[in-house]
Image: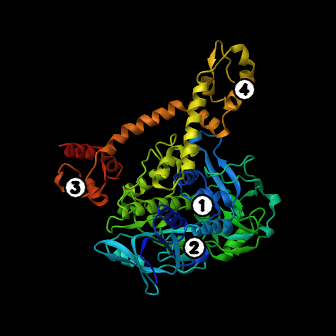
Amino acid sequence: MFQQYDVIVVGAGHAGCEAAAAAANMGSKVLLVTMNMGTIAQMSCNPAMGGVAKGQIVREIDALGGLSGIISDKSMIQFRMLNLSKGPAMWSPRTQNDRMRFAEEWRLALENISNVDFWQEMVIEILIYGGRAIGIKTSLGLEIRSKAVILTNGTFLNGKIHIGEKHFGGGRTGEKAATGLTEQLVTLGFESGRMKTGTPPRVDGRSLNYSKMEEQRGDENPGKFSFTDTAPLSKQVSCWITYTNEDVHDTLKLGFERSPMFSGRIKGLGPRYCPSIEDKINRFAERERHQIFVEPEGWSTVEIYVNGFSTSLPEDIQYQALTKIKGFEKAKMFRPGYAIEYDFFPPTQLKLTLETQLIDNLYFAGQINGTTGYEEAACQGLMAGINAHNKINDKEPFVLKRSEAYIGVLIDDLVNKGTQEPYRMFTSRAEYRVLLRQDNADLRLTEYGHKLGLASDQRLEKVFDKKSGVAALTKLLKSIKVDPDQVNNELESFNTATIREKQIVGNLLKRPEVSILQIKALSEDLRKEIDRFSQEIQEQAEIEIKYETYIEREKKLAEKIGTLEDYKIFSDFDYDRVKALSSEAREKLKKIKPQTIGQASRISGVSPADISVLTVYLGK
């Protein structure tokens, strides 16, 4: 019935879809196994992609040749670039998406990849022979062989849903939990744990009074995620903002005694940075209100996602509290919010390729590794798919450095530091965030994507054109000089200091008050020269000039620290021979098995003194 596959991907969420697409587009024959073909790439939580740091990840996925950016662009109903009041390192694209179209576009994209087959069933066991994954066993008893297996089970592993005092098995509302895999993996020696996440109630948009809320429109000139030719938005849907109040809080408190979180029925740790509404009013009792984002779920549905109101309180309390929010007085609830507990496997048990240390050719990606968020899951799926394909074809592993991508930061953090709570990406986690901007993801990563076979020749050519264009415009702006009598009137109107002698235009552009638009306004000749280049190249050149000092500083720091990555450590290295290591360092190094001194230096519990000892020992 089944042929032997190169790669089997278990789970068809954001991680599974990217893993299947990547491995298949690189040439592997892939089987994507899911418990429900109708929920491929479902947006289980909010109908949005990107946001702070997450938007950078989506652009990196796209630059490498993944599909999340393209799918997001095809299904978006609103686009906003967040943090424009801050520096470019903080600019983060975010789309509001049509939930149904997003899933449909993903399924169509996967069905258009001839190397991807599908199977709907629960996987209960990984087939293992000689310490290597060789396939899967399903609930019907079918055994399907492969050269590698990628687990992307999301919240389904022994998932348990909580609503007030009620609880029942499930990986998502209306869908059963996955059983069997955790038990097998623990038997094999894997360490597992429990985590918790939650979701808010969904309401009928026809029952809301938007006149009592603040409108949140999309950008006037909407951008997009993908560096390909996906179409920009011609029309957008507004989101809305409202707030809780003391009446809402008092109503919610009535349900605290029946709360699964406060009663201790929920054992798993939830995301600290995305707390439930009951957690917010308990932890921040001094606050009189909390922000609620009212987010449409699509072009043609009335369903509304109540962002900021995640809860597992009893459904009657949820409803009573909702109706005390401004604009929600006559709200009709489609379904209540809930919390879900699920199994995860601490990611310190993985290699940087996301292959497990215990079982060869077995990969973990997404929430099974303790992360939260579509974007974090998708990038792990992409990297697992790439590395599974490379491994079975005897190719070099593909690992991104912390200085190359947010994806590199995320995986490095997970493998070396682990996580005790659902891991979410922030710009503050990246020490090289000036280098890792959303605008230059293509310049950083598309050459890698092309070498892997995921980015086309045309995409690479486009990157080379952009690089040469930015270099040419930067050189131009650093060579043109302007006279005081030419530009001082304009400079005064920009509220910036006038000049007393000829000045290079590039130096004027370094001023915080001066943008490239204002540089173009200095003279008609300047405008004509600059407008020979595309808007994208103009923006890139402006950033390169304005933040030149910071960019160079980070590059030098990355190069300096990068030398530690040149010191390789063999996987069978005996740390017990290095007597001067601290006992904690020895224990952590033996567990994580770092591949380089650089990786070892980032492991929690390994001190600079331990690194010095190890470096000297290896030097000998």
Q: CA distance from mark 2 to mark 1?
A: 14 Å
Question: Which comes sooner in the sequence, label 2 or label 4?
Answer: 2
The residue positioned farthest toward the right in the image shown: 211
Disc 2 to disc 3: CB gap under 8 Å = no
x and y percentages locating residue 47 in the rendered image: 65, 63
Residue 459 x, y percent position in the rendering: 57, 49
Q: Amino acid at mark 2?
A: Ser
Residue tagged 1: 280
Q: Amino acid at mark 4?
A: Phe
Depth check, front residue: 458 or 538: 458
- Cα gap from disc 3 to disc 4, whole angstroms: 62 Å
Q: CA distance from mark 1 to mark 4?
A: 43 Å
Task: Identify the mark at residue 573; answer none if there is no mark.
Answer: 3
Disc 2/disc 4 C-alpha distance (Å): 56 Å
Can you tell which of label 2 and label 4 is closer to the viewer?
4
Indicate left or right for 473 with 327 as reference. left
| Distance between the alpha carbons at the discs numbered 2 and 3 | 50 Å
Residue 346 figure quarter: bottom left
Q: Where's residue 187, x and y in %?
A: 33, 77
The three-letter amino acid code for the residue at tag 3 is Phe
Report the residue marked by disc 4: 494
Residue at position x 62%, y 57% in the image: 70
Residue density around tag 1, few if under 14, some if 14–19, many if 20 or more, within 10 Å? some
Cα separation, mark 3 vs mark 1, equals 47 Å
Mark closest to the chain's N terminus, 2 or 1: 2
Looking at the image, residue 555 sits to the left or right of residue 294; the answer is left
State which mark lies toward you, 3 or 1. 3
In primary-sequence order, the first of circles 1 and 4 is 1
Tell me the quarter of the picture where residue 567 sits.
Answer: top left
Q: How many residues crowd mark 3 within 10 Å: few (<14), some (14–19), many (20+)?
A: few
